[in-house]
Image (spheres, helix red, strand yellow):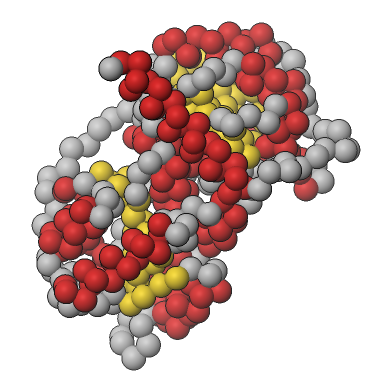
Amino acid sequence: MINTKIFGRELKKLGFDFYVGVPCSFLKNLINYAINESEYIGAANEGDAVAIASGALLGGKKPVVLMQNSGLANAVSPLVSLNYPFRIPVLGFVSWRGQPGYQDEPQHELMGRITTNLLDSMQVKWMYLSADFKKAKHQISLAAKYIESGHPFFFVVKKESFEQEILQEQDRYFSVNKENISQWADNQLPTRQEALRVINGCKDGKTAQLATTGKTGRQLYEIEDACNNLYMVGSMGCIASFGLGLSISKPDFDIVVIDGDGSLLMRMGSMATIGYYNPRNMIHILLDNNAHDSTGGQKTVSHNINFINVASSCGYAKSIYIHDLNELNKCLNEWKITKGLTFLHLKISSGTEEQLSRPAIKPYEVKERLAMFLNRNVSESKGARS
């Protein structure tokens, strides 16, 4: 077995000191090490974990994702439609529950047989992690080099690969909602484009705007294609988790997450994670038209959800219902001064123009451009202080 602490410190020497994971008994000792000695984010599910890690990588971290192989299925969407087109290389450790020839629970039988085939199908390079430390050390060095080329790399981990690491006592933090403003007037129901124009008009040189997949990103692109924009493609529901990872890794930037009701409903558990870790530089804006507008206008169930109370109960510092564009503009400008994790809910009208263009710039070029914007601003800030 591998000495977990020594292995973790080898990862740290290579720069991997930011972990995002979902528990698994095979990986519990590595997870315990990450909690004890590194920065660790506990995600609601494996897809969210990949998205959080991806945002953190864009912000300059070298993330590690930890998951059970049953949860690898949950991570398929971001791995194939976020990490692949945006060329975001994360390092992953996935347990091999249901390994053929070994007794395990029945729910792991099929995934145990197809785990490596699934990684192959997603074009994710992988290795079985050796239980011999010297060999494992060489393996993670190879993985680090592969990741530098822009591709994710996963280790498949067998049972009892890691020596015991005792979990230290963990503090429990309680994120408290300080402001909850529910609907108190009629909705103006502006168009999405009108709302996006207001949001875009409030940005400055320290703002990164992340637009959810579908027409939201496409309309923001038409309003202004800027180096501090990211237009999500695929990986529906992952934009808020991506924003969490970026917010944590870039605390000096304002991270504006523009979400949709269909997207948020798909991975609403991410709000609990965001609320707990509570990045004060993130504002989460829900543009809610009660429809899957990008796929033909099919209704969502958003009309049945009180998102303001959901955000409040998840620990967002401020949770505010927005009735019109003037309120939206006022809240955005106030937030830039006061900060604090904030959720805004604005009802918008459904339907968009028929001829809506798609970004001409490739997803990985969008990512690289945003990374340059973030790093350039950091360099300029350091130069101004010296």
User: Residue 321 placed where, x, y %?
Assistant: 58, 19
Q: Position of residue 16 (x, y in %)?
A: 28, 52
- Residue placed most toward the observer, 221 or 239: 221
Q: Is residue 376 left or right of residue 345?
A: left
Quarter of the image with the C terminus in it: top left
Q: Is residue 218 left or right of residue 72?
A: right
- In x, y percent, where is residue 331? 55, 12
Vertical placement of 326 versus 255: above or below?
Answer: above
Figure quadrant of the N terminus: bottom left
Q: Is residue 32 visible?
A: no
63 relative to 130, above or below: above
Tag count in the figure? Answer: 0
Query: Residue at point 73% right, 43% down?
Result: 360
Q: Position of residue 136 (x, y in %)?
A: 23, 72
Q: Residue furthest bottom?
A: 101
Which of these two is toward me, 163 or 25? 163
| Residue lying at 25% horizontally and 32% vertically, measured from the top left | 173
Give the answer, above or below, for where 300 lies relative to 85. above
Horizontal side of 332 relative to 71 (left or right) equals: right
**Residue 136 showing in the rendered view:** yes
Residue lying at the far right in this picture: please name it.
Answer: 354
Observer-nearest residue: 293 or 358?
358
**Residue name at image x 75 percent, y 31 percent:** 222
Residue that appears at 63% across and 51% down? 234
Q: Is residue 349 above or below residue 125?
A: above
Q: Quadrant of residue 193?
A: top right
Q: Quadrant of residue 355?
A: top right
